[in-house]
Amino acid sequence: MIELSQQGRLAQAQTSSPPHTGDDATSRVNPALNASFKKLIGIKVRFVAPVLGLSCVFILGTALLLGFDRPLMAEKIAGAFNIGYLLVVLMYCLSWAAAAWYVHVANRRFDAQAERAILEACTEAQS
């Protein structure tokens, strides 16, 4: 919800600013070409890709086991609790753990690198 409301403000700010023409338009700095921004994207990809890949493998593996090896999934662990239920519970736990880990890494590494990228982009734009 916050993002949607911020996008509305961003759209209003963009429409209220005068269009860039002439020499000013060619001298604008593209923050995506900034070295700090590229480093931020690299850090995010190195974190997100393995976590997402492992999550997809675990979820797909669980689904395949549920579909193709029902006797194994039906083996009882305790009472009515079987291996299939255990894998589903583990899936939820791993999803929450991955989300908490992402928030931790984002607060420590992504935000710090984003600030550096913003400062570098502002410095380049002023010069």
Image (cartoon, rainbow, N blue to C red):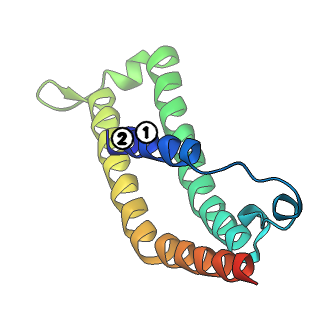
Q: How crowded is mark 2: few (under 14 residues within 10 Å), some or many (20 or more)?
A: few
**124 sits to left or right of 79:** right
**22 sits to left or right of 28:** right
Q: In which quarter of the image is residue 24?
A: bottom right
Q: Where is residue 28 in the image (x, y as percent from the top left)?
A: 79, 65
Q: Residues within 10 Å of mark 1 (few under 14, many from 20)?
A: few
> Element type at marker 2?
helix
**97 sits to left or right of 125:** left
Q: Where is residue 66 in the image (x, y as percent from the top left)?
A: 44, 20
Q: Do the residues labelled 1 and 2 touch (CB within 8 Å)?
A: yes
Q: Which amino acid does label 2 sit on?
A: Ser
Q: Nearer the viewer, residue 31 or 107?
A: 31
Image quarter in which the N terminus is found:
top left
Q: Position of residue 69 (x, y in %)?
A: 48, 19
Image quarter in which the C terminus is found:
bottom right
Identified at 37% across, 62% down, the residue is 103
Identified at 33% across, 59% down, the residue is 100
Q: Which of 2 and 68 is in front in this view?
A: 2
Identified at 69% across, 66% down, the residue is 42
Numbered label tally: 2
Q: Position of residue 39 (x, y in %)?
A: 70, 73
Residue 8 tag number:
1
> Element type at marker 1?
helix
Residue 111 tag number:
none
Q: What residue type is labelled 1?
A: Gly
Identified at 53% across, 54% down, the residue is 51
CA gap between label 1 and label 2 equals: 5 Å
Q: Which of 26 and 71 is in front in this view?
A: 26
Residue 5 tag number:
2
Q: Which of 35 and 53 is in front in this view?
A: 35
